[in-house]
Image (spheres, rainbow, N blue to C red):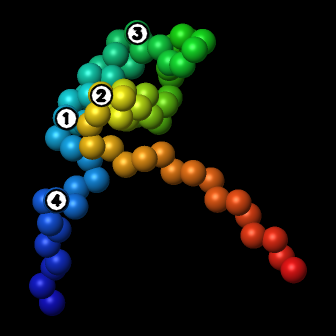
């Protein structure tokens, strides 16, 4: 069977997001990345990526919205 090809228009992230993530990861490696209101040094790779996506979102880049926690279903 032939593999399905993905359409270009269905990309989750825009091209400028990669540059933002790269810049933030370089700051993290240098130890100069600060996060949130506390301005404490970011140590986690996941936190660094979240900061990068947040910055890209604020700049108007194509980034999916944050996932929301769903309310748990009540068993009846």
Q: Are marks 1 and 2 in contact (CB under 8 Å)?
A: yes
Point 62% across, 53% down: residue: 69
Q: Residues within 10 Å of mark 2 (few under 14, many from 20)?
A: few
Q: Residues within 10 Å of mark 4 (few under 14, many from 20)?
A: few
Reading the image, the residue beneath label 4 is: 9
Q: Earlier in the sequence, mark 1 or mark 2?
A: 1
Q: Earlier in the sequence, mark 2 or mark 3?
A: 3
Determine whether the residue tagged by mark 4 lies in a helix, strand or loop.
helix
**Quadrant position of residue 24:** top left
The image position of residue 55, as x and y in percent, is 36, 27
Q: Earlier in the sequence, mark 3 or mark 4?
A: 4
How many angstroms separate mark 1 from mark 4 (CA)? Answer: 15 Å
Reading the image, the residue beneath label 3 is: 32
Reading the image, the residue beneath label 2 is: 59
Q: Is residue 46 visible?
A: yes
Determine whether the residue tagged by mark 1 lies in a helix, strand or loop.
helix
Q: Are marks 2 and 4 in contact (CB under 8 Å)?
A: no
How many angstroms separate mark 2 from mark 4 (CA)? Answer: 20 Å
Screen quadrant of the N terminus: bottom left
- 51 vs 28: above or below: below
The mark closer to the camera, 1 or 2, is 2
């Amino acid at each position: 069977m032939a593999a399905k090809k993905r359409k270009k228009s269905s990309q989750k992230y825009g091209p400028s997001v990669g540059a933002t993530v790269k810049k933030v990861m370089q700051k993290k490696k240098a130890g100069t990345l600060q996060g949130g209101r506390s301005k404490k040094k970011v140590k986690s790779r996941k936190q660094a990526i979240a900061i990068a996506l947040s910055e890209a979102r604020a700049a108007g880049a194509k980034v999916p919205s944050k996932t929301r926690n769903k309310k748990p279903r009540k068993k009846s």
